[in-house]
Image (cartoon, helix red, strand yellow):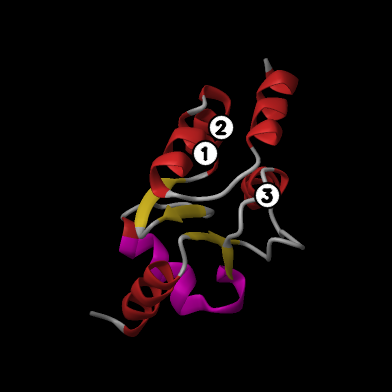
Amino acid sequence: MSNAASRITETINANPVVLYMKGTKSMPQCGFSSRVAGVLNYMGVDFADVNVLADEDIRQGIKDFSDWPTIPQLYVKGEFVGGCDIITEMTLSGELDTLFDESGVTYDKDAADKIREANG
């Protein structure tokens, strides 16, 4: 296992929710990362953010690790969930709520409902 892969494994095992993104949750540096971090922040999810722009090994390593070509990438309880489009769809359909419920991740259900109402 490469150094990047072992660091990724360590991070996703140590944190219930991890977002590999461009920038940080308080200062995203691309629209797709901003959208996913915005959803998680709005829903009050406590998540670890990993700025792939700060580490080229992680930036490429996360793509190899998940076999997914784009950033951002969301992991819940060590499992790859998806990128921006998938997270957006899951948020709007309520699947993300279900995943968080099943995984024991705390989030604001009212905020999730408001996202769906605003996009319905």
Residue 63 among those drawn in magenta: yes
- For marks 2 and 3 on the same chain, the one whose residue lies earlier in the sequence: 3
Q: Secondary structure at mark 3?
A: loop
Gap between marks 2 and 3 measured at Cα: 13 Å
> Which residue is pictured at 72% across the width and 27% down the height?
114
Position in image of residue 80 (x %, y %): 37, 52
**For residue 91, which numbered disc appears in the image?**
2
The amino acid beneath tag 3 is: Gly
- Identify the residue position indicated by label 1 in the image: 87
Res 119 quadrant in image: top right
Position in image of residue 56 (x %, y %): 51, 77
Contact (Cβ within 8 Å) of mark 2 with mark 3: no
**What residue occupies the far top of the structure in this picture?**
120
Position in image of residue 43 (x %, y %): 67, 43
> Which residue is pictured at 68% across the width and 49% down the height?
44
Q: Secondary structure at mark 2?
A: helix
**What residue occupies the far left of the structure in this picture?**
1
Q: Please tell me whether mark 2 or mark 3 is closer to you in this view.
A: 3
Contact (Cβ within 8 Å) of mark 1 with mark 2: yes
Q: Secondary structure at mark 1?
A: helix
- What residue range appears in magenta? 51-65
